[in-house]
Image (cartoon, rainbow, N blue to C red):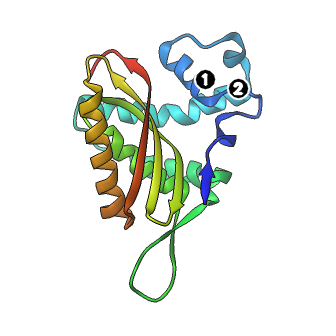
Amino acid sequence: MAIEDTDHERLPCGSDIDAVLEHERDGAPTDHELHCPHCRAAVEEHSVLHAARTELATERVVAPPHLLDDVMRLVRADPRSRRVLPVPGEEEGVTRVRRSAAAAVLRTAAEDVPGVADARVTELTEGDDGIEVALRVRLYTGTPVPRVDTALRTRVAEVARDQLGWSAARVDISVIDLENGG
């Protein structure tokens, strides 16, 4: 069963959320993005996460006391978060993990790989041989793509196995951009 992640990329106003956030990050939002309540709300919601990630990348800090509550409130409010995938186990009963939570676990694993500036899980497919993961990544300039490719596949497969109980049958990686720094 394929789980496509295409409907979430557009805000109610029709703007692509990735473009809105990229423009905001670059300090060059469009006139629409500056005045649209949907675009402003998306930027505000993501600013807490972006600030925490930026701070963590530069020094060791303690997360703000309500960060987890804020993140989980956003996850629960997102209609996509209701999609679930089974987690294998030997005990009686069924365990499921929300697709958005599994994607967050795998995205974090990908972003831990040196040279990766940003990662996004675009698809999780449950197949006979295991889970298939599609990633879109931005790399820091000067990063050797073949080395990062191998490290990403290994890291994502390890985390899928160790934290979610899934064997990774396939990890597809699309390098979509380069970023200075790192």
Distance between mark 2 and mark 1 Cα atoms:
7 Å
Element type at mark 1: helix
Viewed as shown, does residue 59 lie left or right of 75? left
Residue bearing the label numbered 2: 15
Q: Is residue 75 above or below residue 54?
A: below
At x 49%, y 55%, the residue is 101
Q: Quadrant of residue 40?
A: top right
Q: Position of residue 39 (x, y in %)?
A: 67, 26
Q: Where is residue 97 in the image (x, y as percent from the top left)?
A: 50, 65
Contact, CB < 8 Å: mark 2 with mark 1? yes
Q: Tell me the amino acid under the disc marked 2.
A: Ser
Q: Of all residues shown, which one is farthest toward the right? A: 13
| Circle number at residue 20 | 1
At x 70%, y 26%, the residue is 15
Element type at mark 2: loop
Q: Tell me the amino acid under the disc marked 1.
A: Val
Viewed as shown, does residue 159 lie left or right of 39? left
